[in-house]
Image (cartoon, rainbow, N blue to C red):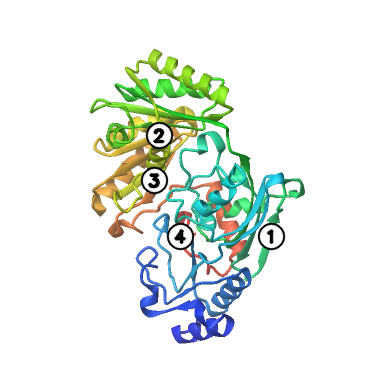
Amino acid sequence: MATADQLIQRLQDALPGDRLRTGAGTDGYDVGGLRPRVVVVPHSADEVLASVRVARESGAPLVPWGGGTCIDLGNPPARCEIVLDCSHLDTLVEYEPADLTATVQAGMTFAALDAKLAEHQQTLALDPPLPGRATVGGALSAGLWGPLRTGYGTARDRVIGMRAVLGTGRAVHSGGRVVKNVSGYDLHKAFLGALGTLGVIVEVSFKLLPQPRGRSALVASFADLEHAMSAARDALRAAAQPAMLEVVGPDVARRLAARTRSDPDEAAWLVVVAYAHAAGAVQRASRDFVRLAHAAGSPEVSALEPHQRPAVLDALRDYGRTEAEPAAVIVSLRGRAAQCEALAQLARRVAPAAAVIATPAVGIVRLYAADADAEQALRLVHSLREGARPLGAVALAERLPRAAVGRVDAWDVSGADLELMRRLKAAYDPDGILAPGRHVAGI
């Protein structure tokens, strides 16, 4: 294993001189409480390749970094010598509006990409938290998506090709840049949600969607969780599928009310729904939702004005993650869609004071605790996992207080899935230099 001086010298030999940051230049790049010896800021895929090769030759663990928005996700790395800040890989490589495809470097932010696509009335329809900072590579590696997954799915549904650098120091390419050229195994899907433990994403090709001509968003209040979930299930069974549908608990409801015309009771649960179709279809879907919400017991259904919609949808997507209102603990319960109500009940039973946001279409319930110390957080995770297992669900600790990090596995995965992940790690990163320990069970 190389000394710090040897590692820095090798990186200087392999890269232009302005690519390295040491000393105070590493401030703000801690990962799981570990500070790197050096931060490398590559400006090309070749420089990423050179950096990974130096890391492997030097036995120096390397952690990829995008916008840093979800760097607290996962387990702390076993070691962290190099942070690879890919934010300068921010070029729109190829965009074919007629083909509805785009290829971008991994450091481009989602907000910048969406702005480019909007010039041609197109959209990617992916909504990671904090898209103004979240980079393509970082968000795909984290695998956290917001309310739009109800109507549009996740990155698995949008990515058609990818270039990455494996821990072996080899560049690989999977899929293609146009939909008709995509064939064979979707190897790039292995990198989605892997937290950079298998490879460093350097370039991604997406299939796009036209922007819808009609949009609406509505908020319905309910006296309790059961009635809110009943309305949500009815809305998901309706002819017009929502672009998003979230069920939010009273704590979140009170915060959202300031951004809407609604005035829910203190204990009210809200169903927030959005439609994105042709203008006529949106009008019909909105009327149908008002009827079914009233039939399910809602005393109030409010339509959001066009200027209100972005604020409400952004608040749901970024809840608990903004610098102004950060949650100390974020845990997501993940099961089947039919289990969403039971998982939400579990969350409220275990942590009555916590905020809850549920996505019934995909069976995800997120719990947000504003204040919790390490011991409280660990008890919370343990209790949620104990309650989730009989349902066949899992509890992912998305954020914990610093003192609790590393004292419990962020995931709760075992069996065949874990063995497959270990085989992938052994094949793609046999020397264990890419973010070692950050993924499931310390992979």
Give the residue pinned by disc 1.
Answer: 173
Helix, strand or loop status at disc 1: strand
Helix, strand or loop status at disc 4: loop
| Residue drawn at 59 percent across, 73 percent down | 47
Residue 1 point in image, percent of width and height: 50, 81
Q: Is residue 151 above or below residue 320?
A: above
Give the residue pinned by disc 4.
Answer: 67
| Residue drawn at 30 percent across, 50 percent down | 326
Label 2 is placed on what type of residue?
Answer: Ala
Give the residue pinned by disc 2.
Answer: 358
CB under 8 Å between discs 3 and 2: no
Whether residue 153 is visible: yes
Q: How far apart are marks 2 and 4 (CA)?
A: 26 Å
Neighbor class of circle 1 (other Cα within 10 Å; few <14, some 14-19, many 20+) is: some
Residue 113 point in image, percent of width and height: 55, 52
Q: Earlier in the sequence, mark 3 or mark 2?
A: 3
Q: Distance between the residues labelled 1 and 4?
A: 23 Å
| Residue drawn at 76 percent across, 46 percent down | 180
Q: Distance between the residues labelled 4 and 3?
A: 15 Å
Q: Is residue 259 left or right of residue 372?
A: right
Q: Is residue 396 left or right of residue 276?
A: left
Q: Which mark is residue 318?
A: 3
Q: In this view, does 124 lie to the left or right of 179?
A: left
